[in-house]
Amino acid sequence: MYRLADYFVVVGYDQEKERSGTSQGKIIQRFPEKDWDDCPFTQGLDLFCQPAGWSLSTQRQQPTFFVSVLTDIDGNRHYCACLTFHETVSMTSSKPDDEDTDDNAPIRQSLMFAPKTIALVSKLSYFETFRNCLGLIYTVHIEHMQFQLETLIGNILGCIQVPPPGRLTKSQLRGGPQVRFSIGAGDRQALQPALSTTIPVTGVAVAMLFQQLGINIALSLFSAAVTDHKILFHSQSYSRLIEASHAIVSLMYPLKYSYVYIPLLPAALSEVLNTPTPFIAGVHSSLKTEISELLDVIIVDLDGSSIYIPECVTIPTIPEPIYSRTTQALTMILNPDLLTSDYAFTPPPAKTSSLPVQDKEIRAVFLRMFAELFTGYRSCLTLIRIHPEPFITFHKANFLGHRAMVEDDFLTRVLDGMGFGTFVAERGPPFRICDTFDEVYATYPETLKEERNGPDKMPIHISNLAQQLYINENPNAQPYVQKIPKPTEGAYSRVHLPPFPIIDWVHIQEIIDEGVAKKSVKSKFSSNKPHPSRIVPMGPHITTVADKMHILNNNARRLEVLRNCVNFIFENKISDARKIFPAVLRALKSKVARLSLTAELAYHIQTNRAMLEHQQFDLVVRLLNCALQNDSSMDENGVAAAILPLATSFCRKLCTGIIQFAYTCVQEHAVWANQQFWEATFYQDVQKQIRSLYAPQYEEHLYTEKELNAPASPKEATERGGSRKSSSPLGSRKRSMSSATYLKPKEISALEIAAEQLRVWPNLTKAEQQEMINNEESTVYSQAIHYANRMVYLRVPLDTNRGLLNALNVEAESTSNSNITNSIAESDSIGAESGFDEQEVSEIGSAVVRFVARFVDRVCTESGVTAEHIRALHQMIPGVVAMHIETLEAVHRESKRLPPIQKPKILSPTLLPGEEIVMEGLRVYLLPDGREDGTGGNMGGPALIPAEGAIFITTYRIAFKGTPCDPLACEQTVIRCFPVATLTKEKKLNAQYLSHIDQWLQDILQLRSCTFQLIKVGFDEEVGPENVDTFRKLLHKIRNPVSVLNTFAFTGYQLSQPTPLQKHKEKHASLKGFAKKTLMRTARKAGIKTKSSTATRKHKYILPTPPTARRSGASSDIVDESEIAAFIASDPRNLEKLAERPGYRDYQRLGLGTLNFANSTKLKSEEFRISSVNASYSVSRSYPALISVPQSVTDDSIRKFARSHRQHRFPVISWRHSKTKALLLRASGFHSKGMMGMFKTHHNTPTGSTAGEITSTSVEQEKYFHAIVAATPLAMGRIGSYKDSKRQLVTGSLEVGVRLSMKSNGSIEHPEFVDSSVQQGLNKAALYVLGEKTQVKNIKADSFPKCEFIPVEFSEVRHVKASFKKLMRACVPSGPLSDPEHGFLTLVQESEWLPQLQNIMQLSGAVVDLLDLQGSSVMICLEDGWDISTQIVSVAEICLDPFYRTIKGFQALIEREWLSFGHRFTHRSNQTAANQASGFAPVFLQFLDVVHQIHSQFPLSFEFNEYFLRFLAYHYVSNRFRTFMLDNECERMEAGWLLDEKTKTSKIDGAVGGETGFTLRTPTTGPTVWDYIEKYHRRSPIFCNFHYVPFEGENVLRPNANISNLNIWQYYISENLAYGPSFDLEIVAKEIKQEEEQELIDGPAQTGKRRLINACYDSVRRKEPDTFTWSMQEINRLQGELEHLPQKWRMLWDGLEHAKTETLQRHMSISTKQSRHHGRTIHKRSTIEILIRGRMAGEAAKTFGQAHRFEKFDYTTPTYCDHCNHLLWGLVKQGIRCTDCGYNCHENCAPAVPKNCAKLRSVLESRPSSVSLSQSAASEPSTPVADISTIQASREMYSQFSTTSRTAEHRTHEGYLLKRGALLKGWKQRWFVLDSMKHQLRWYDSVEDSSCKGFIDLSEVSNVALVRNVQGVPKKTDDNAFFEMKTVRRMYTFCGANAESAQEWIEKINGCIQ
């Protein structure tokens, strides 16, 4: 029995401290004044009486009651029940009279109210009784009742004794009957203890918590509490905080919360929240702002029903299906109507449970959840000691392994928590008092099985369990009527209330002493007996818990192979064993196979030592290593524990007296360094020994195995004896299973033995008890000695000089199974003598000694081993270690004498001139990645990878060179390399086992390059970790240079620092200027006039350099124009030198101005001029110095309107059509605020800008646009030299094409709408501006006559980056594809790389058609003008101008459009360290890919070949040449690259004659790629396209941009392992020469004519050259044999005579003509679609995108696909045809077909229009009418096979409806089609969508009816437009456009279902 309360305390406001400026309380009185012996008084009680702080009030407050929880030093909780009321106090001024008062200080009232608290402190948690007692004391005081307060307090403290409520104590008292008492104030009170003291009492706290937070938040909060997170509640109510904290702790039953628990945390102790340990605490909401800065604390707002989880906190979720089952049960309890809300016939409302019952039902759900979560835990308990006290541990790895939850974070954290440790300690003993959880745990599997068969039983089971919990709290059915006097209402607000009196402590002490002496209440309960202890039910075994699907695996064949292999090894049939050895290694990935392997190996051990031959030993060790490798370090399957005795048994003899055991070869696994593994394995073996110690006493009561297996007849005995000869663990399994089916021998477990021993323990004598204790202690001690030796064997490496294998920090605290961390004998063991000198033990030995000693300390201390035995173990361990090290030295010495494995010689890579090796080669293994090429797998060929060699870092490359590991391919050399500058990602991978060399590779690096190369290497064991770290550091240092001048391109050159063109200013000067401008701007806004400074000061311009631009030289914000002009004028030839570059010379060829600046007269007469307004790069830093503009535009005008574009990149003429004279211009996008609005706030606006200047800027821009329009012949009505008839066709071709394509293949359903609106919007414009949607929409078209602003869609740079990453992963995957459905083509499709190329080609094609067919000028104004704009302009110029398809022309194009116009190569390619964060953006590579696509479609139109494009794609990122470095021409001018003088040429150092000889200029600024290409182009036709046919006159290319016509560039997927990338020609030439020299040394090989070429290894281009290259090589060979001077290939090629044949007029066939005109029509259609989509708005744009409705169609005549132009043929190749417009295509082409269906009823109506469209194009030859009629006749013949109307699909009704989704989903608009033939109601995303998204089978529909009062409907919907459709599966709810539409749908559906 316990006292009801321990202390009564009166706490009041401390007025003395208040005068000093602090507000706090003080303890006025406490009773008893002397501490109890068993319960000392808790200090700091005043803080918990007012958690929010002590403060005075101006008004009286109502009395409040709450309970605080205090925790003493022993972890025991004390409850402080506080009742607070206010008393009147008189206050004076807070400051002395002699001090000066602050006038602004608030005046404190003289009459204030101070809080006073009366509190009861108790170890018991009877909160309601405390409330009644304190309420009585307050009532007696305030109502002046005739009772003495001393009597009441004395009775509470000394006379009333009650049993403990809901606390687990050692006595385990049964909850007693109802206690009735009175404290002496005329009251009658009753107190009811709980029946079971182990189950918490909650009342309604849990139900209130779920009502406040909801199910999801409450479950998240529960998961956080169980997994040891920090939780903080806050609320305005103290009682809510107490109840919520108590509820969350009660839900954890049967676990106990063992961390900091402070439901009411005082504000003064808020620093406790910064503790690193978990806690559950609560604070008042007034402290909300102070707790918001906590980083790792989960904050719960009880008042707002919300939870805040920091980003750094991850709450693990309850594993499935437990979580779903728990959520379903909670929903059924809290929201019962939710499960029946969709019923057609609403059932009667369910009877809701009362709040107390609902509380117990929720607790029952969580109790069931824990029973399911811990299912099988008792079979994982390990018994260590029985006497004198039972000691039990939990085998966590075994539990998680059998439950298949090793990776489950939630369960792992729960098992690692302190709560579960207490759970095992209290509930682990098999003989103890049981409670509700033990009963639920034992019966839950059967309960769960019943619920699966009958789901309706789950509510019944939960209700029954809740009833048990309710009876536990309320055992008496008839409640006792209590009498508790209370004060009258409003008594606290009386004016004159007496203060709480001073209590007479003497009187109280007398009453306490008298009550203690009598102990009358205690005798009343003396008859109560404790709960009887009994054997705890075991529940389900862990082996039966696992899912049957995981158990019943078909492993019979694998186990048979495993068994045969082991038998072959021990029968010394090594060759047979090696044949099936790979299959065995694959089989060991299964857990069953690994366990079977250990059983088979154990069967072949006859004695303690199994001596093997060398080959046998090697194979057994490989099997053991493979089994350990496939297991984790936790050893959840017990494989390592089973291997432990095997490793100490198998051995081989090295020489006389020296034996090597298997444990020396299996030490490289992390499991041996895991302290938990050793403890768990040790405890398992101890349990076996303890069981064998007591098992003989119980065998007489059990069936023995011998009796069960006794033969029934002699014949049966003979059969059993004959089968034993071939017995083995695998073979005997079948026999045992057959006998187990009818009678299984019972085997008593260790826990059952312990239960029986604990039951009889009190009846034994002292001598018998002591004998049992000694026997168990000896058993544990002997096992400790045994395991100490085993640990030494597995931890000491064979070579002690290499270091400790899998070394862990043994000095740090190990995460062990035990909570005991300090050793009893550790201090004694330090000074103990071991018999060995400490100096004899090496550093490794010391580490092993510490590791083993820590293990011994932990397990022996927990197991109750005596201190003497522990000390003896510590003395033994150093000696064992020293002896073992000495033994291993001889073993290691002899093992090295075995024949070693020969490693190949390290091959040095071939270097470029000037290339140096930075780090010598490290021996590595080139590992296979996701590519199948070269692995010898499904692709065939030799296994070139993995390869063994070395990896090098040079100043230019990362190179691997080695030989394959496969002995069949080891004579070949494997080279894989890429430039260091192309490295995009370096990643360190986990350790990997390489079966080819039987070695575990620890350090693996994966290096990925943007040249589509991947080097995945594993470092050899001879390479130390420090070398790997050095390698990585050097790699990053070379990859990220400070400046481009530190790259390989400038190696060996004398470089000077770039000369900046800007004036640098001091730092303080810049700050001064900035401050001055800021002050002036502020003054202007305030209306203060500033002094004008425009008289004599020079004008300053602010550079338009963007903030993100990175430059190698210094930058300046303010540029003095006069100084820049002086720099340009310092040498008059500077501009002339600059104009000599290919990009500028092209202006004169195009007629865009003359580069002769001296002849000003001629310049004025020309229509265009070359302006030098940007010669100082002051207008736009990213623009070239010389630009082409109309003659009428002045330089001052350019400076003004340039500000209307981003980065001041104003429109500049790039190209001019030679026939139509149309112009192609490029610029950056307009500012987002509009054309001119951005000048008001733009940062580049001069400080003196006024509204007039802004207006003039807008005017100047309009003038510039007018000048461009005036320079376009279309605006003046003249088109070059064309005749009028042809001019009409050319200029009107697009307009005619619009009308005809809309009839045939367009998407306009109403032609009259197109004729009036679309054609009006598509009138011929002189200038088309292609811009962004967000910028073009604000432009006023009236200010720009004859101009059309067309918004277009394009891929931004961030999309290009993301797409490129996906493309690299698809082309060069890092590992094999896990999902076979996601193959290479699927990954390429998901990368969206080809659609981006398509978009570029379509936009460029639109530019081509507008310039060539219509004669309109085009201006590209996209993004900043240096990415997508450059791509579109460059591709359009290549298609329009044949000059750019030559090598010289392509160079001029790159020089002008990419280099001069400022594509940011350094930034996009991440060439320096400052650009690494931006990410690699392959904009230029994308352009080259587009050129490659055009080249593949028009191979006769390009002078250069595809290798030329690959060469540029490789070297624009290689940093070997300076051409593609820096971001703009200004930076290159600063670096001195553009005006360098041509110097003499000289041969490269180290070059030799022949192909390797090569000359270059030797400037001081590094080589250029153009010089390199030019020199090699002169020497060999490596870049030449022999199929090139130069056309005279116009040759416009119109490539097909359909996805089906695009292909994946071989540059992305090709590889040459023989020489590496073939783009460094000198390296390839040297490698070939070395091979030739080696062949001369070895002699000619006897080879036949047949040669094998491996595509991934050999260079097919070199091994099998084309005819022209082979002829050139033969001519050179013959010239050498004849000793003639070698002739250049160009002279030979030009000397060839062209065949002179008569020109024959070739008549094209009908199919050829149709195919050609069809391709041109598609190209023009794409242009029209871009224009219409950009121009049309509203409904017209929507109708343009109508989708086709395809159906399968059998073509009986040759028909071409309208999408890919490939053949469709009859019954063999079945295609699909649109039922509306007759569009024909393949099934695979359907997703990519443009959505431009005309929805025509007849197919024949569209065909003449298509033919007339081809006739309208000027470039198309006219088609004879007879041919057209023939085509029409043939089509009419087969028109009977076509489906020509919509009725073929039986669309009974269709239209838009709103459909409500499933649970928790909203409404969405869908296009519905009612099909009467298929009996379906299908829905689509829109009317244009051709793929069905779902359907409802009308056969399942039972009813369709209108419905009203639908919840959650969308806004602005008709209430009468809703109807429901009930099926056998679910209920569908729809909403029509109006009530009539809904009624029509109902009638149509009912008509179909009747």
Image: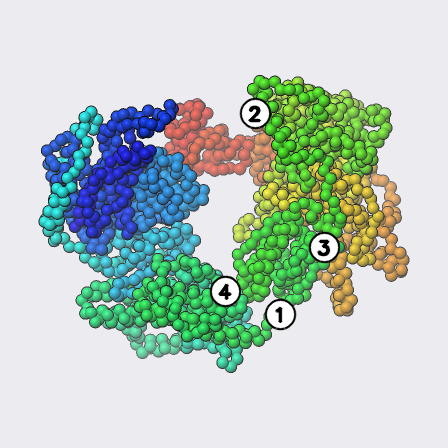
Q: Which quadrant of the structure image shows residue 1909?
A: top left
Can you say whether 489 is above or below 709 in the image?
above
In terms of secondary structure, where does tag 3 sit? loop
Binning the other alpha carbons within 10 Å of mark 4 as few (below 14), some (14 to 19) or many (20 upward) gives many
Kindly check if marks 2 and 4 are in contact, taking CB atoms under 8 A apart as contact.
Answer: no
Kindly check if marks 4 and 3 are in contact, taking CB atoms under 8 A apart as contact.
Answer: no
Q: Which mark is residue 805?
A: 4
Q: CA gap, disc 2 to disc 1?
A: 77 Å
Considering depth in this image, is 45 or 1750 the residue closer to the camera?
45
Q: Is residue 1014 left or right of residue 588?
A: right
Q: CA gap, disc 4 to disc 1?
A: 24 Å
Residue at 65% over, 51% down:
1038
Binning the other alpha carbons within 10 Å of mark 3 as few (below 14), some (14 to 19) or many (20 upward) gives some
Can you say whether 525 is above or below 137 in the image?
below
Q: Amino acid at mark 4?
A: Leu
Kindly check if marks 4 and 1 are in contact, taking CB atoms under 8 A apart as contact.
Answer: no
Considering depth in this image, is 1799 or 680 the residue closer to the camera?
680
Q: Which mark is residue 915?
A: 3
Q: CA gap, disc 1 to disc 3?
A: 31 Å
Q: Which mark is residue 902?
A: 1
